[in-house]
Image (cartoon, helix red, strand yellow):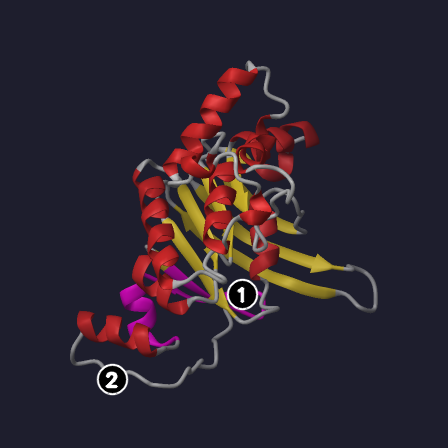
Amino acid sequence: MIQLHQISKIYNQGKTNAFQALHKIDLKIADGELVAIIGTSGAGKSTLLHILACIDSYESGEYYIDDTLVKNCSEKKLAQIRNKKIGMVMQDFALVDDFSALQNVMLPLDFSKSKVSEKKEKCLKALQAVGMEKFAHHQSNKLSGGQKQRVAIARAIVNEPEILLLDEPTKGLDPFFKRTLAGILRKLTVSGVTIFMVSHDIEFCAEYADRCAMFFDGDIVSVGSPKEFFAGNSFYTTTANKIVRDWNPGCITLSLIHISEPTRH
């Protein structure tokens, strides 16, 4: 489980160009839950993602992974958490171009004391989980965007993490690969993996997330199930409209995106 209590982040603290990126964030994410964060660029979504990944610090508040208070961890302990408990897929996939898919997936195992044959078997299982075992020896720069995405996910889950963090996972994917990605993520949540996703893809979030949260100016201003979130007040697109109408035929939806003025807490 992930627990955030009053998390605040200030860049350039004490300087004239100080900027508060996060304002006392409170959020709990259960084991096996997929939570999507939606918001405009610069709202603080990526900052929160980096804090969850233990690659950025925060000024105040408490961040727990299960019973572990992150701010009390040494650098060695944080490295262990990043390697064993957290998997992350970056927006640009961050694959090594001249490595094969298999070699890319093996990267998190570089410091493992396991035999090379055991590492290879583990990586092939991760590639199989995302339907990419047939492309194990293909050079990554020869793969399509959807295939690169799946290799990046395989690399993120090869150590069987408890938490998977995704930054714009559907960017550049066609509808077929989006559905494929949704199936992969659902299998992971069923197995107990907690997934936190930053996305501008409203339709994907509406259809596949367990909960959605609206980020605005460094604060979570709305959170709920997709039905509550999209039918309540946030914003709509054509597909999201259809999904909401299916849930609640009597509701009124908008054809244009609308963001209501958030209420500060």
Label 1 secondary element = strand
The residue wearing badge 1 is 219
* Mark linked to residue 252: 2
Label 2 secondary element = loop
Q: Is 166 or 34 nearer to us in this picture?
A: 166
Cα–Cα span, label 1 and label 2: 27 Å
* Residue span colored magenta: 212-234
Vertical placement of residue 121 versus 178, above or below: above
N-terminal label among 1 and 2: 1
**Residue 48 location in percent, x, y?**
57, 55
Outermost residue on the left side: it is 249
- Residue at 46 percent across and 25 percent down: it is 122
Outermost residue on the right side: it is 15
The answer to which quarter of the image holds residue 30 is: top left
Picture quarter with the N terminus:
top left
Q: Is 250 or 110 nearer to us in this picture?
A: 110
